[in-house]
Image (tube, coloured by chain):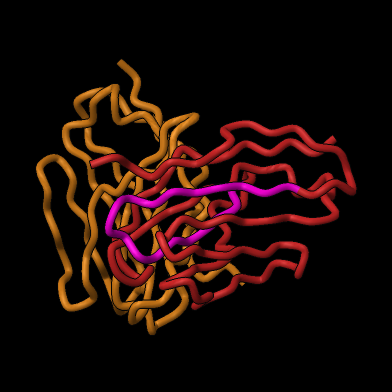
Amino acid sequence: KAGVTQTPRYLIKTRGQQVTLSCSPISGHRSVSWYQQTPGQGLQFLFEYFSETQRNKGNFPGRFSGRQFSNSRSEMNVSTLELGDSALYLCASSLWLAGGEQFFGPGTRLTVL
Amino acid sequence: DQQVKQNSPSLSVQEGRISILNCDYTNSMFDYFLWYKKYPAEGPTFLISISSIKDKNEDGRFTVFLNKSAKHLSLHIVPSQPGDSAVYFCAAAFGNEKLTFGTGTRLTIIP
């Protein structure tokens, strides 16, 4: 069974631009969660989608948004990029809801210049 | 407000000895705890978990201990191997809600 895939793996943008990251969960998994990882901050929860509906949202500004499609694939979008948005963005999928074991993708490394 | 805390950013252990990674939490509603391991340029991988109805769970070289009264959990790795060198994250959840992660501990196994 293929694992969680994320595209692109690396991305360089400039301040003010917007970016869209993509995540394909493990086949059959219905929940997709997104996290931001920065040095010293661990994994900060962004949001979780289940059956195309956002179930939970973390403490991030409205510039961060996401969606999930009927095939469970998910995208997250960051508008008006700031230097502080430079981070590793991780996507995780789980069979059911997000409160149990999650399977992570390799992440997308976003650098904002 | 950091509800899950890993107070040791790094830990070095001799190969063959026991590695003990610690994690504290503040939310008494948490009822499920997990440990993940992360290598550079890879996503975290699940290691072991424990439900709040238990105080210990073992899987091979990995054992997780939960002390609910102290709101503390620990991961024991014995014997430690060079391949165990990685960043370890503890995480907690209640009900089927989202996972809350700690900030991670970088474990280095010295050959």
Q: Residue at x 35, y 48 (%)?
A: B36
Q: Nearer the viewer, residue B3 or A15?
A: A15
Q: Nearer the viewer, residue A16 or A39?
A: A16
**Residue lying at the far top of the rendered structure:** B111
Supply the letter of whichever chain is red: A
Quadrant for the C terminus of chain B, please: top left
Q: Residue at x 54, y 54 (%)?
A: A43
Q: Residue at x 22, y 40 (%)?
A: B77
Q: Nearer the viewer, residue B108 or A81?
A: A81
**Residue lying at the far front of the rendered structure:** A70
Image-based side of B105 in relation to B55, left or right: right
x then y, percent, for residue A85 = 75, 49
Image-based side of A16 in relation to B54, left or right: right
Image vertical order of residue B96 relative to residue B64, above or below:
below
- Chain B visual colour: orange
Image-based side of B46 in relation to B7, left or right: left
Image vertical order of residue A90 relative to residue A58, above or below:
above
Q: Which residues are magenta?
A: A19-37
**Residue lying at the far right of the rendered structure:** A16
x then y, percent, for residue B17 = 22, 30
Quadrant for the N terminus of chain B, please: bottom right
